[in-house]
Amino acid sequence: MAQVPRAEHDDDTPVFVISVAAELAGMHAQTLRQYDRLGLVSPQRTRGGGRRYSGRDVQLLREVQRLSQEGVSLVGIQRILDLETHVDALEARIERLTAELEATRAALGAQSRVFAAGARGDVVAVRPGQRPPRMPSSQALVVWRPDGG
């Protein structure tokens, strides 16, 4: 007998109806409806308008419940959730930029060069970690302004 392949579900796949999500989160279904109206936990909707909660939604409901039990107001909980989402986005951006920087460094490899201002104000190439040679008798100061002034 041939087996039917199972569809793989991740934490973002909306699979739970409201009654199951409420039971998994340890809440009443009416509480989930209220949280949806307030925008705290907004599940996906079916074509008929029914709510479908994902595993991530259930985790979020548990977090809302924990914060509420600690005395945080619903407005405070919303602010905390917004800040956590913002932090997650910033961390993802840092990861992307770090990967891009590492790729750029790898692409440059031995070709990378470091430039410095020489003793007379000229641009000189130096090895990484090396200082340009100094002229002992020079007391000149060169100032560069990006506006050309």
Image: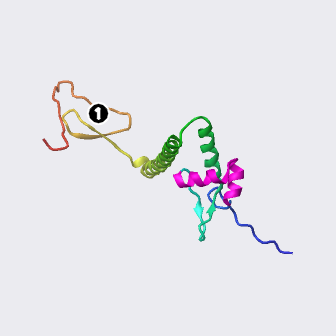
Q: Which residues are magenta?
A: 17-39
Residue lying farthest to the bottom in this orientation: 1
In this rendering, does residue 56 appear at all?
no
Foreground of the two, 100 or 84? 84
Q: Looking at the image, which is closer to me, 93 or 134?
A: 93
Q: Which residue is mark 1?
A: 132
Question: Residue placed at 65% from the left, 51% from the top?
Answer: 58
Q: Quadrant of residue 12?
A: bottom right
Horizontal and vertical percent for residue 24?
A: 71, 51
Closest to the observer, 19 or 96:
19
Magenta segment main secondary structure: helix
Give the class, few, some or many, for how many residues have Cα within 10 Å of label 1's Cα (few <14, many ≥20).
some
- In the displayed structure, would residue 6 be above or below residue 99? below
Farthest residue, direction front: 30
Helix, strand or loop at mark 1: loop
Left or right of 124 on screen, residue 85: right
View extreme (left): residue:
149
Residue 70: x, y in percent?
60, 35
Residue 40 is covered by the magenta coloring: no
Amino acid carrying mark 1 in the image = Pro
Residue drawn at x 81%, y 71% as measured from the top left: 3
Q: Is residue 143 left or right of residue 72?
A: left
Where residue 124 sits: x, y (%)?
26, 40
| Residue ID at (19%, 38%) | 144
Quadrant holding the N terminus: bottom right
Q: Position of residue 49 (x, y in %)?
A: 59, 67
Judge whether residue 22 is colored magenta: yes
Q: Quadrant of the C terminus?
A: top left
Q: Is residue 50 visible?
A: yes
